Amino acid sequence: MAGHSKWANIKHRKAAVDKKRGKLWSKLARNIIVAAKAGGDPAANLTLRYSIDKAKEANMPNDTIDKAIKKGSGEGNAETYQPAVYEGYGPGGVAVIVDALTDNPARTAPEIKKIFERGGGNLGSPNCVSWNFATRGIFTVRAADAAEDTLMEIVLEAGGEDVARDADMFEITSDVAAYDAVRKALAARSIATQSAEISKIPATRVAVDLETAQRVLTMIEAFEDNDDVQQVYNNLELTDELMAKMG
């Protein structure tokens, strides 16, 4: 499982770019609207609470969050979005899953297919790669901020699964159902998380050369630039050597 933090760091850098482009808040608001349709109370709606947490991490104003919740809860005219999942392969046979929220699947599907093809990959059939991924709660904590034994004790007591060291970071994994309990347990002990998310984690990864890795990352950035795309998951093996070469 260790190694996810490398990809998380790349995603966080990409998120900073998205903020400047004004895309990230729009995507997060869309996610809140959809989550709020199942109930506007974050205390009773874990998906909504998670969506709000991600919005706050991106410094979205509270009034913008509140407006999105009200839209999703039926107050005012809310856009109608539906989830869509696209699976396929990138350069080097790297598996890719694209999670989207779209108001027009007839528009989104061809756009996603085109990005796969332009990136040197191909759109596959449903479930062609998802069998290799498991949905987990993932947290990263700086090794300087907590002792491994202490962290392991906190995580396991909260229902988490594991703590693994990856360079100067600890990577914590949990079942989705235990995500909120682990998050609260870490906060209660004043242990800061560098990232906290619910993600799809591959059981196996694909090792590629530098050129192929760069092509894969370029394709993933193209997906993330699409307004309908919420998350992109892959099983690219980002080794320390590759990371060093990419700077």
Image (spheres, rainbow, N blue to C red):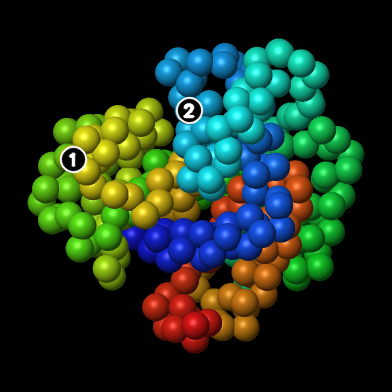
Give residue 192's position: percent from left, percent from top: 29, 49
Q: Is residue 165 visible?
A: yes
Q: Residue at 71% x, 58% y: name it.
A: 21
Relative placement, left or right, of 1 versus 29 is left
Residue corresponding to mark 1: 189
Identify the residue at horizontal 76%, vertical 48% (top origin): 227
Q: Nearer the viewer, residue 103 or 124?
A: 103
Circle 2 is placed at which residue position?
A: 49
Q: Is residue 7 visible?
A: no
The amino acid pointed to by label 2 is Arg
Residue in view at x 46 percent, y 24 percent: 46
Is 128 left or right of 194, judged from the image as shown? Answer: right
Quadrant of the rendered structure where residue 209 is?
bottom right
Q: Position of residue 152 (x, y in %)?
A: 16, 46
- 244 above or below 128? below
Dot 1 alpha-carbon crowd within 10 angstroms: few under 14, some 14 to 19, many 20 or more: few
Q: Secondary structure at mark 2?
A: helix
Along the horizontal axis of the image, is 72 left or right of 209? right
Figure quadrant of residue 2: bottom left
88, 194: nearer the viewer: 194
- SS state under label 1: loop
* Residue in the picture at 27% in, 68% down: 168
Query: Looking at the picture, which amino acid does disc 1 mark?
Result: Arg
| 43 is higher (above) or lower (below) than 8 | above
